[in-house]
């Protein structure tokens, strides 16, 4: 860089006085010579370097010189920047979901956490979730469910979980799986929680409607049944079930295919034609 042959005994002050010698290099040398340790990264001639400096002291503790170690970290720097960029992209991705997503190591320290998870933990447990946060701090909270503690233990033992649960009058589904290293050793866990309250409530309403419908048709004197275009029973009342059982000796229920009756010798062909 400077067209100088450095040998033992060379006086670095000569280098300091050169116009092309960076001022920051001079400052680094002087800093360590005055007794301060140094560890700094810098860019020079399109490369990245790490400079480490330590003062030399005699037996009396007096500064008598300095040692320096300089290494090219361009590849390491680029790799680190790529990892940081990937982490930012991943964080942006999970923050744009409506679900709670988080990962942690086996020491229960948070690695990543979505915006929803951070908000939930703040609202419920008044906890500020950041990378490095130990989730065991939440375990002593009166509102913290014991089942959640066990789920961490289960995943850290190597199990994958799929659990539906209710919390604060909301319905959720939980997916969790261990994170393994290249040797298949569990080094962490990833969790995904989806609020399924709307879906669950709609399912319950549908179920109740089906019960109400079945109750209605079962209390009707006549035979009532419904089929799809494939001739499968969708719904039928007890009167219809009893009639088919008595006449054709067949047990019918939702899912039964009416075509099973068509070839029976006592099945009226005009009934078949009515379906067609």
Image (tube, helix red, strand yellow):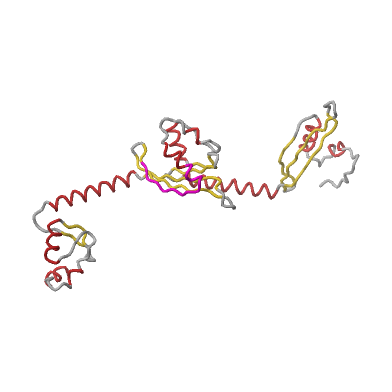
On screen, residue 91 above or below 59: below
- Check if residue 163 falls in the magenta segment: yes
The quadrant in which residue 144 appears is top left
Relative image position of residue 118 (x, y in whole percent): 47, 37
Tally of numbered tags? 0
Relative image position of residue 97 (x, y in whole percent): 44, 46
- Check if residue 231 falls in the magenta segment: no
Residue lying farthest to the top in this orientation: 60
Residue lying farthest to the left in this orientation: 221
On screen, residue 176 above or below 268: above
Q: Quadrant of the C terminus?
A: bottom left
In the shown orientation, is residue 15 left or right of residue 186?
right
Relative image position of residue 127 (x, y in whole percent): 48, 32
Front residue of 245/181: it is 245
The magenta region covers 152-165
Residue lying farthest to the right in this orientation: 9
In the shown orientation, is residue 80 left or right of residue 6?
left
On screen, residue 236 above or below 113: below
Relative image position of residue 193 (x, y in whole percent): 42, 44
On screen, residue 20 above or below 182: above
Residue lying at 64% horizontally and 46% vertically, measured from the top left: 80
Residue lying at 18% horizontally and 52% vertically, measured from the top left: 214
In the shown orientation, is residue 99 left or right of residue 266?
right
């Amino acid at each position: 860089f400077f067209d100088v042959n450095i040998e033992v005994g060379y006086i670095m002050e000569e280098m300091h006085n050169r116009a092309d010698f960076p001022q920051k290099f001079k400052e680094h040398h002087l800093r360590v010579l005055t007794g301060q340790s140094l560890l700094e990264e810098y860019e020079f001639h399109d490369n990245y370097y790490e400079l480490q400096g330590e003062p030399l002291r005699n037996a009396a503790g007096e500064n008598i010189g300095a040692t320096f170690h300089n290494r090219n970290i361009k590849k390491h720097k680029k790799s680190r920047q790529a990892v940081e960029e990937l982490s930012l992209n991943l964080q942006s991705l999970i923050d744009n979901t409506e679900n709670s997503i988080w990962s942690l190591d086996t020491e229960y320290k948070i690695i990543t956490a979505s915006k929803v998870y951070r908000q939930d933990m703040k609202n419920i447990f008044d906890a500020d979730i950041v990378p490095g946060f130990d989730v065991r701090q939440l375990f002593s909270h009166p509102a913290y469910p014991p089942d959640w503690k066990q789920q961490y233990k289960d995943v850290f033992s190597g199990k994958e979980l799929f659990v539906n649960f209710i919390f604060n009058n909301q319905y959720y589904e939980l997916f969790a799986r261990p994170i393994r290293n290249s040797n298949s050793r569990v080094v962490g866990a990833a969790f995904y929680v989806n609020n399924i309250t709307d879906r669950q409530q709609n399912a319950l309403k549908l179920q109740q409607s089906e019960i109400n419908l079945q109750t209605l048709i079962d209390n009707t004197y006549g035979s009532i049944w419904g089929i799809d275009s494939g001739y499968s029973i969708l719904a039928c009342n007890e009167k219809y079930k009893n009639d088919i059982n008595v006449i054709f000796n067949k047990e019918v229920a939702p899912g039964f295919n009416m075509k099973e009756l068509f070839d029976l010798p006592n099945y009226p062909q005009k009934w078949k034609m009515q379906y067609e």
